[in-house]
Image (spheres, rainbow, N blue to C red):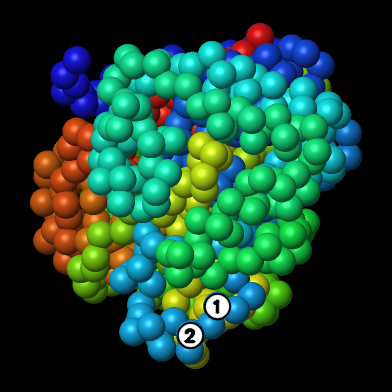
Amino acid sequence: MNENWNFESRRSPVLGTRGMVATSHPLAAMAGLQTLQNGGNAADAAVATAAALNVVEPTSTGIGGDCFALYYDSNTRNIRCLNGSGRSGGAQTIAEMQSLGIQDFGEVSTTAHSVTVPGAAMGWADTITRFGTMPLLDVLKPAITLAEDGIPVTPVISKLWVDSEDLLKGASPHADEVLLNGRAPRAGEIWTNLNLARIFREIGEGGPKAFYEGYAGKNIVKVLEPLNGWLTEEDLSSHRSSFPDPISTQYRDYRIWEHPPNGQGLIALIALNILKSFDIREFDRRGPDLLHLLIDSVRLAFREGKSHIADPDFHEVPVEELLSDEHTLKLRGELDPAVCIAPNEGPEQVSDTVYLSVVDGVGNACSFINSNYGGFGTGIVPMGCGFTLQNRGSGFVLNPDHPNKLEPNKRPYHTIIPALITHADTNELFASMGVMGGYHQPQGHVQTMINLIDYDMNPQAALDEPRFSIYRNPPWGIVSIEDSIPAPTIHELNRRGHHMDIATGSRRLGLFGRGQIIMRDRNSNVLWGGSDGRGDGAAVSW
């Protein structure tokens, strides 16, 4: 079936009271909802959804990648973090890479050199252990059933799969495990993944050790060795999640919570700090003045964030300083309402991720994100495993003077960021939200948050509103913008010095991400959900 990729559509928000799941595929959302209905809480349902997404949307996510989570406990009103990102190989150094003639990770971004330890398996198990209530096997059963029974491939996912077909065929000897009769499945065809179902069952029965030290772990090392990868059995067996404190800032009457570095949530907070001194409601939402302000605030935030964000075990990130009133005032002083901060065009950068949000019936929330980084990541399939390995190592730089430089057993700069919003006066939950899409993510957070807070939009309307994205080489790349922004606005932004790129059709899938939002009414406890119309997603409730 031919697709015209027309994104000009309207959805209504989804409402419910006993629990809600919002993510980028309806079958995955139903896996999470089923878990809630079986007595699980928000954390249980989040992992069930993440695992199901590996089955239905392997083009963006999987157990060969990483995950991050923010968990809101409705009893204590506290927010806790899980960092499920993996580390570089213990023998991988800048000197070793340069001895191979590699000067930049961009040269090898989809090769075995960019494979880091997959953190998702441990992250899923730790989410359940720390925050959940159900046995891990029970949480994984909906995904196992989907993988064994088969799922129909959607048009969006089929397109992303076809785009990666050549990568998969050339990445490893086991490409057929993630292809259908030697090619990417087409829309409407049934996809089964018995190998992945078996791996999930092994994890459910034996815990993450069964993944890192069992069949999957041994075959990860085995497939990487002839491809000049760096991971060893020791790198896998020694992997652990971490549980840092969240970072936050107050914006209007709300507190915005993000995951700390090595994630890039700090960038969204810096941008919101710049913006909170402006009366955003006085601006036309699609007019040049607001978009000019948003674009340059995001540019400044990226400049600061990318200069500092790295693995905090190796580099102390000055979060408090970067979020201080004094630093914000300095950044605000660089804004010029008439002329943009001069951009320079940069290379295209591609990333794919899945985001999911769950709020259960008593108000616990889990904001959860899982990613291969670039689509299928490296496209490398460990034999008999049915998943691909991420290329998250390409988030490192090979500049020995940069905080995010490659070092052994180090986590790279990470693009995936979940978010939560609470009422500043009581810390009651206001929203669990996220917008996937590589470097677009902090930009998507900022734009949807001002829609929710300043323009009082419901979750679906906030996601439907057209967005911009400095996707290429942020902060200084050209600005992509959706064609539903008025032409006079785009013309004026160009006149002020922004290099604007009007994006239409399927290009929106990568450039503007796909977001999910669940809001909780503090008076009635009614849940309001939205799912981005740029993808296949759905918010489901009961």
State which quadrant residue 63 falls in.
top right
The reply, left or right, for residue 33 in relation to residue 473 is right
Farthest top residue in view: 542
Read off the residue under disc 2: 96
Secondary structure category for the residue under label 2:
helix
Residue type highlighted by circle 1: Gln
Along the line of sight, which residue is nearer the eye, 82 or 275? Answer: 82
Looking at the image, which residue is at 56% across and 32% down? 195
Residue 474 in the image, given as x and y percentages of width and height? 34, 65
Instruction: Determine the CA span between mark 2 and mark 1.
Output: 7 Å
Q: Which residue occupies the foreground of this view, 516 or 274?
A: 516
Q: Residue furthest right?
A: 76
Location of residue 384 with respect to 256 vertically, above or below: above
The residue that disc 1 covers is 92
Q: Amino acid at mark 2?
A: Glu
What residue lies at 54% left-to-right and 14% top-to-bottom?
149
Q: In the image, residue 70 lies at what x, y percent?
A: 69, 45
Q: Quadrant of the N terminus?
A: top left
Q: Are circles 2 and 1 on residues that touch, CB within 8 Å?
A: yes
Q: Is residue 51 left or right of residue 462?
A: right
Task: Count all numbered tags in the image, as a single digit.
Answer: 2
For residue 319, side relative to residue 209 (left or right): left
Query: Which residue is at a point 60% across and 79% down the rendered structure image?
Result: 91
Task: Rate crowding at label 2 as few (under 14), some (14 to 19) or many (20 or more) other CA atoms within 10 Å.
Answer: few
> Which quarter of the figure has residue 370?
top right
Q: Is residue 189 above or below residue 185?
A: above
Q: Percent from the top left, x then y, of residue 316? A: 67, 79
Residue 351, compared with residue 409, is above or below; it is: above
Q: Secondary structure at mark 1?
A: loop
